Image (tube, rainbow, N blue to C red):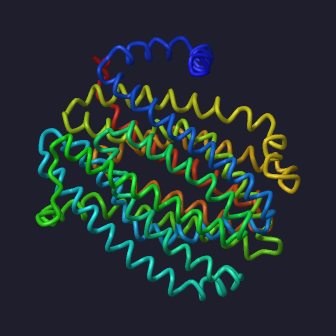
Amino acid sequence: MTWLFAKSAVLAMTPGFLRRKLDRLKASPLGSRLAKGTAWALVGTFISRGLWLVSSAVVARKLGKEGFGELGIIQSTVGLFGTFAGLGLGLTAAKHVAELRTKDPARAGRIIGLSGLVAWGSATVMAVVLFALAPWVAKNTLGAPHLTGLLQIGAALLFLNAVNGAQTGALSGFEAFKTNALVNLWAGIAVFPLMVGGVLLYGLRGVVWALVASAAVNWILSHLALRRHCARAEVPLSFTACFREWRILVLFTLPAFLSNVMWGPANWACRAIIVNQAGGYAEMGLYNAATQLSGIVSFLPGVLGSVLLPIFANIHGQGDKPKFSYLLKLQLVLQGCMGAVMALPFICAPDFIMSIFGGDFTHSANLVRLAMLTVIFNSTKWVAESAVMSTGAMWKGLVASMLLVATTVPAAYMGRRYGAMGLATAFLSGTIVSWIWCMWCVYKITRCKAQTIT
């Protein structure tokens, strides 16, 4: 009953012209794939994100602004080193498995094997690097030597996230949305008692270990699921002949890696600029809370965006340009509307919603509104990026990352005295500049005449 009520409410708010297009899409085989994928991804993500938000609220209340800010910078630092470990291999697997799983299963299996082997190697190297550099990073860049041990624990989190990224990408390539939803569901169920128990028993250290344990659960479930889907689709996993596909690492993985390499350190640097100011960790705590809310608002557009990449790649592999163009235009409109509708309650009542993190987090209305505007722009940018990646034009995606970095980092430095507000403004500015480039790429892609999807 709840699902039917929510569906009716969303349809009631949908403009008539968009509703007619959705009806035509729903009646098509492609529309059925998109609807089923989105529904399953939505269920898993909604539950896992909901449990994550509740867990974060408990953790924030227990740790306070400063402790929650320390958790945020630990996660950001792990993410920075994880950028070098992941190498964009999840995108590589998703795009090529979706394109090749039916017309060349053997090659799809080799690409899965190549992605997995390279991910294990890079994850091991970067985990060791983080563990070794943790004392220097904590003392000289974060101004918090007491975080050394926690960053070293984070090396295990980095390793698990990196190797799981390639597996998750391959599952997306199979359009295994139901499986991914169930994995997210069980991982979300696991993270709640782990984080709450961790913070109550051992404080911040307990939370970091809880994140490691949750990542381990996610990796195990994804690994078993990937082997099952390979067997079902008759895609033979190959680790001995996989290096025959090394050219993909240059043509696709390299620009994806460079995009992440630029944005990962830039994202971390912006946060490091803030925490090195007076009262910086308290400001980072506020910003970390706002980003938790952004994650809730962006979950629906983000879920749909994750579903689009393999479907776009599959259509592109079939050479159906009009169908590709039609779906791209429709999804841009749909996700833009979704992002705006989801963000509206947070824009209208920001202090009330921030109060779930505790009294220290209220009086941050403008911070939340800036974060919500960033989500709205990202909602359509994700669609454009998925379309560009599915065509293999990864170097255009690299330009988008370059524009994002070139705008965000200087803006964060200039606004450093304003703490969380300066950081939020910087991210919004970079997002808008990158969004303009992505929309130009969409214009170039959709110049062919569109047709109704059948």
Residue 398 drawn at (x, y percent): 40, 58
Q: Is residue 219 above or below residue 275?
A: above
User: Left or right: 116 with respect to 329?
Assistant: left
Residue, x 15% and y 63% (percent of image)?
242
Residue 152 found in image quarter: bottom right
Residue 116 found in image quarter: bottom left
Residue, x 16% and y 38% (percent of image)?
102
User: Left or right: 350 with respect to 217?
Assistant: right
Residue, x 19% and y 40% (percent of image)?
233
Residue 230 drawn at (x, y percent): 22, 47
Q: Is residue 133 above or below residue 264?
A: below
* Nearest to the observer: residue 280 or residue 57: 57
Q: Is residue 174 above or below residue 434?
A: above
Q: Quadrant of the C terminus?
A: top left
Q: Is residue 206 above or below residue 41?
A: below
* Nearest to the observer: residue 429 or residue 58: 58
* Nearest to the observer: residue 70 or residue 422: 70
User: Left or right: 161 with respect to 289?
Assistant: left
Residue 270 drawn at (x, y percent): 64, 67
Residue, x 69% and y 72% (percent of image)?
273
Q: Quadrant of the N terminus?
A: top right
* Nearest to the observer: residue 53 or residue 16: 53
Instruction: Count numbered badges in the picture.
Output: 0
Residue 34 found in image quarter: top left
Residue 67 drawn at (x, y percent): 76, 68
